[in-house]
Amino acid sequence: MSKGFTLWFTGMSGAGKSTLANLVAEELRARGHRVEVLDGDEIRTHLSKGLGFSKEDRDTNIRRIGYVAKLLSRNGVVAISAAISPYRDVRDELRREHQRFFEVYMNCTIEKLSARDVKGLYKKALAGEIKNFTGVSDPYEAPHSPELVLDSGTESVEESYQKLIRRLEEVGYINPAGGAR
């Protein structure tokens, strides 16, 4: 059985966390890993229903995702979190609680995020129509030392994907394609 780990994507809404998480999950499954994607929107619907968007509620939501990820990863599953997780202190707390934790910061400018925002959320948030919107009216705290920074504003999805797979191989969390498990 392969060793589990937590792959934690963080970044603002629309930065590409879920897209990349699902691509990586597919690749890791093809390499024989057991994988579970913990998508931020799905978790809010099923595990954190009723929580709002105050700092306390956001922290509770992220801690719940982190707890589930810890249970999965210690049992040989690659737990992939794709949630905004805006506050550095809670992400750092989770890092300390996990044996194998790999943080990916999906960096992207507000301008790029706004330009590709099909739902118009950034436009509404910038106009003051949406309160507590991360990166606009509520803070997003970028990680100080993530294992990998991807710039989804300048890199293609494929470029980011390749960088991430290479880095996971380099640190020994996954074997090279075609390698022994």
Image (cartoon, rainbow, N blue to C red):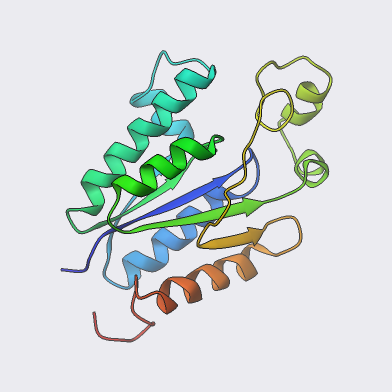
Q: Quadrant of residue 116?
A: top right
| Residue 147 visible in the picture | yes
Q: 8 or 143, which is in the foreground?
A: 143
Q: Is residue 77 left or right of residue 132?
A: left
Q: Quadrant of residue 115?
A: top right
Q: Is residue 81 left or right of residue 116?
A: left
- Residue 118 point in image, percent of width and height: 73, 36
Instruction: Give the tally of numbered discs.
Output: 0
Above or below, 56 against 43 in this view is: above
- Residue 35 point in image, percent of width and height: 30, 56
| Residue 37 visible in the picture | no
* Residue at the image position 61 percent from the left and 65 percent from the top: 160
Above or below, 173 against 11 in this view is: below
Q: 90 or 107, which is in the foreground?
A: 90
* Residue at the image position 15 percent from the left and 68 percent from the top: 1
* Residue at the image position 76 percent from the left and 61 percent from the top: 154
Q: Residue furthest bottom?
A: 179
Q: Quadrant of the C terminus?
A: bottom left
